[in-house]
């Protein structure tokens, strides 16, 4: 599956323009045993940490209500991308090759259970800590409830065997798409069902419309789905194919573009500040003992293991304060609410 950038630009005439907040795109490419999951993180905040999470750590969840918080011990180490502190990742990969990524979906309605509650970010860490396959993630859905701390999300999950799941929360119920229920492994910022309905209006999927270069969620969904279908004429895929597709849906505020190679247990990424693709191999880390972080805006080499530093609560608090200050400035949250949530997160992390 060789998708050249010239081809992408020719059929799509991509332009980079402003977009509504919370616009993200994720998708999966699979071919001949190789599995890639790719994600554009489109958002106005660029701060971030890459966190090395150890296995064998006893954890108590961030308290979301009056019930007893969830407790567990991490079975697997992982590397995650975090904007709201350690234990609150946006996405990542564990040492078994399981990857979880999120995109926003403002109409998500979560189940109303009051027990075993995790926030929308710590749910990602919980799954990376405890699951090695899509099947294990799905089995846990009846045991763990999500209550949003800041944002409403839906998730794409993929494992090293190439199994994919899209997990959504529709009208208070958990909706899971797997196997032949996933027509195209793409997720943007509309429900998966509505995205598929829209896709069927386009050439190659039953309709007559042609692909547009629009920045909207549904237009990005169609663009990626079309490129995946067109690209399937060839036999192999590589990280460049995934980055070329990500470039086709890049927005003015795309902060991070990430390609996870689940087969090789590698993470490739670039940022607005760093155009060169950086590579992290999970094989370089000892998850029994590692307690490290990488600061995303510092990376300036293709192999960045040497730029990781020992985790410190001070760097973590610095990240949280910066992120919440930008949320306030953008009008995403009031100062009072930001202060309350930020304070609780800092207290939680200090007491770990």
Image (spheres, rainbow, N blue to C red):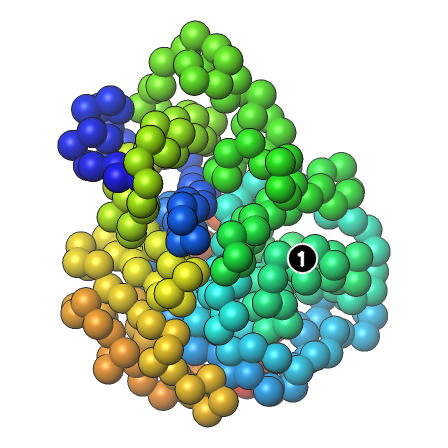
Q: What residue is rendered at 51% in x and 34% in y?
A: 184
Quarter-wise, where is residue 256 in the image? bottom left
* Residue 327, image x, y percentages: 44, 54
In the picture shown, does residue 187 fall above or below 87?
above
**Residue 257 visible in the displayed image:** yes
* Residue 199, image x, y percentages: 50, 21
Q: Is residue 21 left or right of residue 304?
A: right
In the picture shown, does residue 120 fall above or below 316?
above
- Closer to us: 183 or 49: 183
Q: Dot 1, crowdedness within 10 Å: few (<14), some or many (≥20)?
A: some
**Residue 149 visible in the displayed image:** no
Provide the residue designation for mark 1.
135
* Residue 22, image x, y percentages: 45, 43
Q: Secondary structure at mark 1?
A: helix
| Quarter occupied by the N terminus | top left
Q: Residue furthest bottom?
A: 289
* Residue 2, image x, y percentages: 26, 39
In the picture shown, does residue 313 fall above or below 98?
below
Q: Is residue 107 left or right of residue 226?
A: right
Q: Is residue 256 left or right of residue 290?
A: left
- Closer to us: 117 or 232: 232
Q: What residue is rendered at 33% in x and 31% in y?
A: 233
Q: What residue is rendered at 62% in x and 41% in y?
A: 179
Q: What residue is rendered at 83% in x and 56% in y?
A: 113
- Closer to us: 341 or 60: 60
- Closer to us: 83 or 330: 83
């Amino acid at each position: 599956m060789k998708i050249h950038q010239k081809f992408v630009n020719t059929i799509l005439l991509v332009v980079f323009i402003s977009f509504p907040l919370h616009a993200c795109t994720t998708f999966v490419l699979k071919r001949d045993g190789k599995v890639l999951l790719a994600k554009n993180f489109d958002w106005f905040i660029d701060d971030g940490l890459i966190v090395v999470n150890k296995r064998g750590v006893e954890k108590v969840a961030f308290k979301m209500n009056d019930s007893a918080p969830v407790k567990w011990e991490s079975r697997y180490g992982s590397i995650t991308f975090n904007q709201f502190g350690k234990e609150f990742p946006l996405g990542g990969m564990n040492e078994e090759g399981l990857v979880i990524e999120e995109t926003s979906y403002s109409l998500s309605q979560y189940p109303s259970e009051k027990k075993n509650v995790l926030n929308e970010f710590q749910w990602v860490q919980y799954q990376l800590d405890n699951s090695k396959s899509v099947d294990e993630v799905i089995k846990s859905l009846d045991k763990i409830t999500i209550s949003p701390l800041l944002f409403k999300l839906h998730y794409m999950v993929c494992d090293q065997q190439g199994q994919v799941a899209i997990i959504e929360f529709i009208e208070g119920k958990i909706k899971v798409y797997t196997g032949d229920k996933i027509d195209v492994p793409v997720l943007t910022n509309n429900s998966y069902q509505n995205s598929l309905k829209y896709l069927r209006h386009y050439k190659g999927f039953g309709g007559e419309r042609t692909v547009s270069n629009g920045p909207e969620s549904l237009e990005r969904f169609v663009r990626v789905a079309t490129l995946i279908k067109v690209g399937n004429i060839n036999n192999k895929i590589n990280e460049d194919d995934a980055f070329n597709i990500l470039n086709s849906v890049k927005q003015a505020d795309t902060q991070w573009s990430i390609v996870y190679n689940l087969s090789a247990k590698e993470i490739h990424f670039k940022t607005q500040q760093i155009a060169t693709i950086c590579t992290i191999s999970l094989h370089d880390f000892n998850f029994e003992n590692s307690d490290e972080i990488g600061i995303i805006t510092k990376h300036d080499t293709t192999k960045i293991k040497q730029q990781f530093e020992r985790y410190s609560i001070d760097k973590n608090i610095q990240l949280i304060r910066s992120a919440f200050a930008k949320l306030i400035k953008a009008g995403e949250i009031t100062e009072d609410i930001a202060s309350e949530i930020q304070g609780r997160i800092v207290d939680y992390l200090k007491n770990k």
